[in-house]
Image: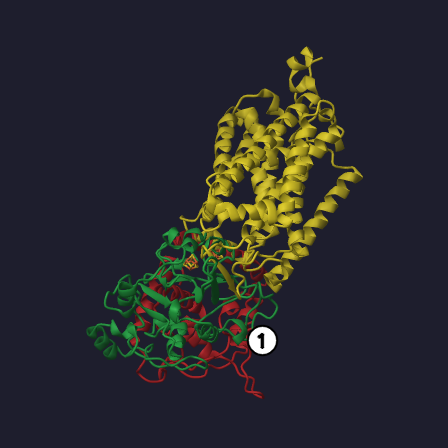
């Protein structure tokens, strides 16, 4: 059990899981999916609850020009150049769930690089403005688009302060079954909700770890013993556009 | 000789009438074709992208919706504020309001990623969303205005029409505030982050709506060869002048307040100085052609009395209004989001870059189609129902004033 | 306020009636279902049961099960597999015999398309969802490992829901 997801699982629940023997905890390896510590998931038939709030902490000091997180996300969720999709769309129209942003301080010339994606805001503007309720926040803080009821009005894209969302401009085929996406709807980073529900960590965080960059931490912000909480406690972590007071689930160090 | 007020349907038999109908039908057909194409292929055939997510269709839709609530003003002045001079125009005013709103809504809906999910839009409501509230406001506006017109036309209900007119007036104010608030909620976008936007939309609606009304009125009376007296027309054009000046005032205050706040300097420099097409549209079309020129024309002692000049001024106001919404809507999106103050940013997702947008033929066809739908509704309605007074000669409009002059 | 169910039901019924109009015009002349050529599922759900619910029930109400599961999964993170669309696909996908390749959703031989084209009921599931199997099924079938509670729990819940909406 090397990641902090499993760390914070209490033992009674883990025991229960073993007994329950539901189907979801089984290690399923699909092409292109990284294997990670299995089990330790919530029982598949249990809804997520507000006990937890998932978050990601990014240490920009350890983040350089590498873009493994972006590549991992593309492969995992089936968007971008890793897949033969969105060929009709111009680069301005193609979806990007996560991107590397290069920053250069205008006065000191100091440069840094960081991955930017949906910040999973607690008081998410996208959720507030969505007319149908397709943009919503799960009990555990993950912000998603329910594409079944998204009408493609793009108001959420107008409202998001981080430009985290993309609209699908053309017909899409060969989606990953765990990451449905299609024409006329809006999408963004899901914090790999399908993996998280199975007790795994998001693909980007895993890729960052796998290459020993260790610039990303994933875990439960509500659990003070989780690695992410302790890291935040010790070294802090800022929100992008903290002035908007959105209480984002993604935090950065060194910006 | 005592002239009474009589409403009558237009004849609608001339070749010109049918040509007009056919022309509008053609435009609507083209729009429908475009919609089918955009929906089938996806929005990649449009100029819109992940930077400019609302494009030309929204400019048209918002213009029509804003103008719709303003078009009702003429009726309100007559009913709510008891100016009997405007009463003969109330029916047309209500009709134009409905027609413009429908045209605007159709454009708005047909540009959705999933227009086929209209039923979802009507059954799943997020009551926190100002957008969802607007859907309710639009429907309420349609219903109230229809009742209002009905009460005016139906003798039995006539005594209630003032009440209906009063509610319609209140509702329209709320509606335009609601439309303005769509932008007010976008806290992250600097151009829209202004409390002034909602009242500015209300005053814009007065101006655009009245301009549209004057044009339709003049065209209808001219083409049907019914008399339209100077008295009423000059009243309307003076009112338009007041509204155009008010919009201009709001625009100036809006930019001055932005210039006062340091954090908005960059975006102001973009719109006012360095924004290329947006700067050009702002100064030349919105301010020059759309505000100053019509103001001068309307208030000029001799030009202001010429009918072609009045019509031209009204048309210029409409063009200026389009430009204003284009600058506000597209320009506001083109300016990149400021996420890391003090840093230069770059990414594969066009962070820190001015967004580019060139509307496609499909979007233009859709927007124009919306205008055509509005006009078609007006024409068909005045053909089958009694919307237009047979004459609007000065004696009919206001016997006292006419005699005195 | 995500589920104004009454409103939705009313609208849906109206819509259904509208769509049914052209069908009604043909009276009883419509082809019987049995004449449709549909592909065989890849396997049985259990020794006694072919699908996750009796075939009759699935024919009539499969969309209700899928819809219910969809909301549970998307909004609550419930990831049981029995009524997951992906498992429908895993089991019901049709292969072209000569090439061994799966047919896509726009092919009339696709399991879903076969019926839906016939009944002219347009579905947009596959605008977003994969229409062919991608990863192996995690739904264990043919033995006792399928959590029966899950099946019966949902079935009971759905029956209540359908009864409330006045459907059989
Ligand atoms: S970052 Fe944007 S898309 Fe993500 S929750 Fe916040 S507002 Fe919504
Ligand atoms: S595009 Fe979809 S998710 Fe975004 S606001 Fe509109 S309906 Fe909601």
The answer to which quarter of the image holds residue C81 is bottom left
Nearer to us in this view, B355 or C50: B355
User: Which hue is chain A drawn in?
Assistant: green
Quadrant the N terminus of chain B occupies: top right
Nearer to us in this view, B15 or B401: B401
Shown in yellow, the chain is B
- Residue at 33% from the left image edge and 62% from the top image edge: A237
Categorize mark 1 by other alpha carbons within 10 Å: few (<14), some (14-19), many (20+). few
Q: Position of residue B17 (x, y in %)?
A: 75, 39
Q: Position of residue B95 (x, y in %)?
A: 60, 35
- Residue at 25% from the left image edge and 71% from the top image edge: A8
In this view, the residue farthest toward the front is: A108
Shown in red, the chain is C
The answer to which quarter of the image holds residue B20 is top right
Provide the chain ID for the residue under circle 1. Answer: C
Q: Is residue B239 left or right of residue A159?
A: right
Q: Position of residue A118 (x, y in %)?
A: 43, 62
* Residue underneath mark 1: C107
Q: Is residue B159 left or right of residue A40?
A: right
Q: Is residue A29 above or below residue B397?
A: below
- Ligand 1 location (quadrant): bottom left
Q: Position of residue A182 (x, y in %)?
A: 52, 66
The answer to whether residue C52 is seen in the rendering is: no
SS for dot 1: loop
In this view, the residue farthest toward the right is: B15
The answer to which quarter of the image holds residue B103 is top right
């Amino acid at each position: 059990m090397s990641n902090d997801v499993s760390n914070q699982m209490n033992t009674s629940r883990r025991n229960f899981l073993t007994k329950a023997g539901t189907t979801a905890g089984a290690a399923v390896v699909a092409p292109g999916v990284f294997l990670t510590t299995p089990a330790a998931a919530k029982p598949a038939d249990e809804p997520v609850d507000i006990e937890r709030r998932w978050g990601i902490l990014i240490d920009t000091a350890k983040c350089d020009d590498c873009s493994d997180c972006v590549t991992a996300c593309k492969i995992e969720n089936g968007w971008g150049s890793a897949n033969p999709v969105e060929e009709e769309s111009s680069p301005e129209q193609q979806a990007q769930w996560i991107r590397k942003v290069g920053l250069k301080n205008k006065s000191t010339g100091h440069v840094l690089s960081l991955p930017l994606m949906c910040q999973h805001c607690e008081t998410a503007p996208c959720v507030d403005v969505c007319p149908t309720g397709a943009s919503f926040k799960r009990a555990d803080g993950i912000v998603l688009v329910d594409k079944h009821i998204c009408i493609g009005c793009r108001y959420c894209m107008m409202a998001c302060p981080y430009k985290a969302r993309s609209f699908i401009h053309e017909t899409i085929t060969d989606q990953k079954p765990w990451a449905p996406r299609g024409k006329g709807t809006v999408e963004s980073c899901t914090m790999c909700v399908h993996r998280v529900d199975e007790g795994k960590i998001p693909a980007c965080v895993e890729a960052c770890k796998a290459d020993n960059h260790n610039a990303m931490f994933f875990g439960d912000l509500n659990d003070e013993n989780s690695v992410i909480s302790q890291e935040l406690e010790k070294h802090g972590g800022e929100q992008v556009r903290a002035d908007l007071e959105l209480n984002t689930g993604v935090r950065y160090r060194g910006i | 000789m005592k002239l009474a007020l009589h409403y009558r349907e237009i004849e609608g038999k001339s070749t010109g009438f049918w040509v007009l109908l056919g022309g509008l039908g053609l435009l609507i057909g083209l729009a429908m074709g475009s919609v089918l194409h955009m929906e089938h292929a996806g929005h990649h055939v449009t100029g819109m992208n992940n930077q400019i997510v609302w494009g030309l269709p929204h400019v048209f839709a918002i213009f029509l919706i804003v103008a719709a609530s303003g078009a009702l003003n003429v009726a309100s002045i007559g009913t709510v504020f008891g100016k009997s001079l405007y009463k003969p125009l109330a029916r047309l005013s209500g009709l134009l309001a409905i027609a413009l709103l429908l045209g605007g809504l159709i454009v708005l809906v047909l540009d959705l990623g999933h227009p086929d999910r209209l039923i979802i839009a009507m059954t799943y409501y997020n009551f926190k969303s100002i957008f969802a509230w607007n859907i309710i406001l639009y429907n309420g506006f349609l219903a109230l205005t229809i009742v209002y017109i009905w009460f005016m036309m139906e003798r039995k209900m006539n005594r209630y029409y003032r009440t209906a007119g009063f509610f319609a007036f209140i509702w329209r104010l709320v509606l335009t505030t609601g439309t303005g608030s769509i932008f007010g909620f976008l806290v992250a976008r600097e151009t829209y982050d202004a409390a002034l936007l909602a009242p500015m939309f209300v005053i814009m609606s007065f101006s655009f709506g009245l301009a549209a009304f004057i044009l339709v009125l003049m065209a209808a009376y001219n083409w049907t060869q019914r008399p339209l007296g100077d008295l009423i027309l000059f009243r309307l054009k003076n009112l338009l002048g007041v509204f155009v000046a008010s919009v201009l005032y709001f625009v100036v205050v809006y930019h001055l307040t932005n210039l006062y706040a340091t954090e908005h300097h960059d975006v102001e420099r973009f719109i006012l100085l360095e924004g290329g097409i947006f700067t050009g549209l702002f100064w030349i079309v919105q301010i020059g052609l759309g505000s100053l020129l019509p103001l001068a024309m309307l208030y000029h002692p001799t030009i202001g009395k010429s009918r072609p000049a009045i019509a031209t001024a009204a048309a210029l106001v409409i063009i200026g209004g389009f430009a204003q919404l284009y600058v506000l809507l597209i320009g506001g999106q083109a300016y990149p989001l400021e996420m890391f103050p003090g840093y230069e940013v770059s990414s594969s997702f066009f962070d820190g870059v001015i967004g580019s947008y060139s509307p496609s033929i499909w979007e233009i066809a859709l927007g124009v189609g919306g205008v055509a739908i509005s006009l078609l509704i007006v024409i068909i309605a005045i053909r089958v129902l009694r919307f237009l007074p047979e004459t609007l000669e000065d004696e009919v409009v206001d016997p006292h004033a006419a005699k005195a002059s | 306020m995500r589920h104004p169910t009454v409103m939705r039901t009313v609208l849906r019924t109206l819509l259904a009636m509208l769509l049914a109009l052209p069908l009604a015009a043909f009276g009883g002349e419509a082809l019987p279902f049995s004449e449709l050529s549909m592909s065989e599922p890849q396997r049985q759900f259990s020794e006694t049961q072919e699908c996750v619910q009796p075939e009759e029930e699935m024919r009539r109400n499969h969309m209700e099960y899928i819809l219910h599961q969809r909301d549970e999964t998307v909004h609550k993170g419930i990831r049981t597999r029995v009524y997951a669309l992906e498992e429908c696909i895993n089991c019901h996908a049709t292969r072209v015999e000569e090439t061994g390749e799966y047919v896509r959703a726009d092919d009339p031989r696709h399991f879903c398309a076969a019926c839906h084209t016939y009944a002219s009921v347009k579905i947009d599931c596959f605008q977003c969802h994969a229409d062919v199997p991608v990863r192996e099924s995690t739904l264990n079938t043919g033995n006792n490992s399928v959590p029966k509670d899950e099946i019966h729990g949902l079935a009971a819940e759905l029956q209540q829901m359908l009864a409330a909406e006045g459907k059989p």
